Amino acid sequence: MHGFNPKWRDVPHFINGITYEIWEARQIGSLHSRYAPGLIVRSPASVLTDNTNVIAATMATLAEFPDRELLGEDVIWCEDPEGRTETSEAFLSSHRLICTATHSRPGAYGAPTGKRLAYRILADCAIRDDAVYDEWLVRDQSAIVQQMGFDLVDWTRDLIAREGGPENCVEPMTPAIDVPGPYDRHGNDNPWGQKHADLLSAIMAGHMDRIPAVYDRGAALHYPGHVTTQGRSEADQFWMGLRAAFPDAAFSIDHVIGRDDPLMPPRSAVRWSLHGKHSGWGRFGRPTGAEVYVMGISHAEWGPFGDGTPSLRREWTLIDETAIWKQILLKTGQHA
Amino acid sequence: MKDFSNQFKDLPDYILKITKEIWEDRGLSTLHHYYGKDIPMRFPSGLVRGNAGVIDGTLATLCEFPDRQLLGEDVIWSQDTQDTGRYLSSHRLVTMGTHTGHGAFGPPTGKRFEIRVIADCAAKADVIDDEWLIRDVGGIARQLGWDPVEYARYQIQTEGGPDKCQRPFHPDHDVDGPYMGRGNDNEWGQRLASILTQMMDKDFTVIRREYDRAARTEHWGARGGWSFDFAETDWMRLRSSFPTAAFKIHHVIGREDPGTPYRAAVRWSLTGKHSGHGFFGAPTGAEVHVMGATHAEWGEWGLRREFTILDEVAIWKQIHLHTGNVE
């Protein structure tokens, strides 16, 4: 870990360590050095190019959710030789977290509901010189909203109003407003990552029969809205419902990592996107024709089981459904 | 695999295939082949002998939940050291179904359940001839709208009252089957056995030492949680209900398989008095046997996943039969 504080053993240690220090150990001020100047944070809800506000935003979250814990489930990472500088090695980390918190104070979500929340975040961070210098993050926003007791679409409509209406509200991420950052690489070429990317590409091309061929019969699945389920037909229904809503959208594989680590099953992390019209019946109701950009991140664990052929045994996929609804509401004028 | 049909590549393949063949593919009659004629099956709800009973039980369950699926999550297995053609499979599965028929849970509710099961099966030459099977009956009961306390009373009544109902399993009723193994001596099995033993010795600091901070724990009652707190609280409540009960480790497997995290399967029990507060209400002094099975997976940061199944309904039944409060 040349270029990083020597207390960090490896990339997962660094990522889990700084996450803990910033949030739970309250070293919020350390963001000055841990977020590189000019860092761009892309999430489905926004493209943040001005990070001067990050400390205030972190404090606002902790003021609303004082007991928020970030439990690092996995860090799937790759080397980034092209990103190396004279002073530091570089890496890309895809971090999967479980976030638990009690909504106990007033804040961005309104008056405290007292609800106990559990949801996942998948965050891709480019790191070097002991800092994060480029980022893509998908939070399971529909889990948060639904666990607080709100309806997804109503909440999103309110959000537009709270942010000042369609003219002034925060614009969800689309290629039109995305800003290229310093990290423009595409991961590593480990076969498990490739296998995962091939699976998603096949599904998006309508080869739904790849699901029973590649997923284990008992695969454990984790989907948006904090849904935990099991088995091939559930995987089929998630991916079918998503593709059916955007049948003609362009699918793109944006970043792929595979890993074989001791003590761990083979695993993969894929960042992908769909861009096109909401022109079909599916997960997002009546087709509206709205142009929508969907940024998704998927993690998987693989292994030999049953007849010994390696299969996908666990999957985590997140998209931000509120950001999708926001695009639909804004473009159809149904925000009022 | 010595003496097994060559359609099976290895023990997990055998277990997964025959499970699907028997249940989803409706091959109940294959149990004449795959299950020993005199197999002792130890359920927390009681000891059952012979494959005829297994076939009838399978049929009754399929009538109650015709769409029942059994999805194998893992098979953690060992080979007998003496008799190398004999294996023990600890099979963890998620099973789900819709309650559309009459049966042990009463008239159909149309509700769906999803629970975990851990089945320890001894197999030799294509045949399972010894078994320990723990279903999360408390999880089914809750999802079908029962309180497990009340469902245990309902069981006693529908089985003919406190004098005639089926007796929950107790080691006094046990019989020796053909499998006398204790597992293997892989270090991960020993590690899980040691974690459980320390908890049952009331050293709950072991969880913070051994578990990953982001560990996921799946427990009986179809409940689960993350990190240390859920595991600590749940294990403390269990031990606190039976604070003086004898804890025994019966079977321990550890495995290091390529492409798979290190993992372990331990079958254990608690036998003794219901003499404390915890999971099972006010102490009643009932003599209780708790049959438990735990699976675990490790990663770079400690124990990442823990799965423990016990049958709360069988425990409540023992408590009700002791107190006589069966109405």
Image: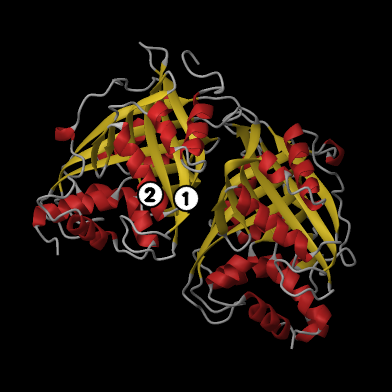
On the picture, is A63 further left or further right than A90?
Answer: left
The circle drawn on residue B167 is none
* Quadrant in the rendering for residue A284: bottom right
Q: Chain of mark 2?
A: B
Q: Chain of mark 1?
A: B
For label 1, count other residues whose C-alpha is less than 10 Å away and answer few (under 14), some (14-19) or many (20+): many
On the picture, is B125 further left or further right than A192?
Answer: left
Residue identified by numbered label 2: B61
**A225 is higher (above) or lower (below) than A160:** above
Quarter of the image with the N terminus of chain A is top right
Please say if the residues under marks 1 and 2 sit with CB atoms less than 8 Å apart.
Answer: yes
- The answer as to whether the residues below labels 1 and 2 share one chain is yes
Residue identified by numbered label 1: B68
x%, y% of residue A25?
Answer: 54, 56
Q: Secondary structure at mark 1?
A: loop
| Cα gap from disc 1 to disc 2, whole angstroms | 8 Å
**Residue B192 shows in the view:** no
Determine the residue positioned at 68% across, 39% down.
Answer: A214
Quarter of the image with the C terminus of chain A is bottom right
Q: Earlier in the sequence, mark 1 or mark 2?
A: 2
Q: Secondary structure at mark 2?
A: helix
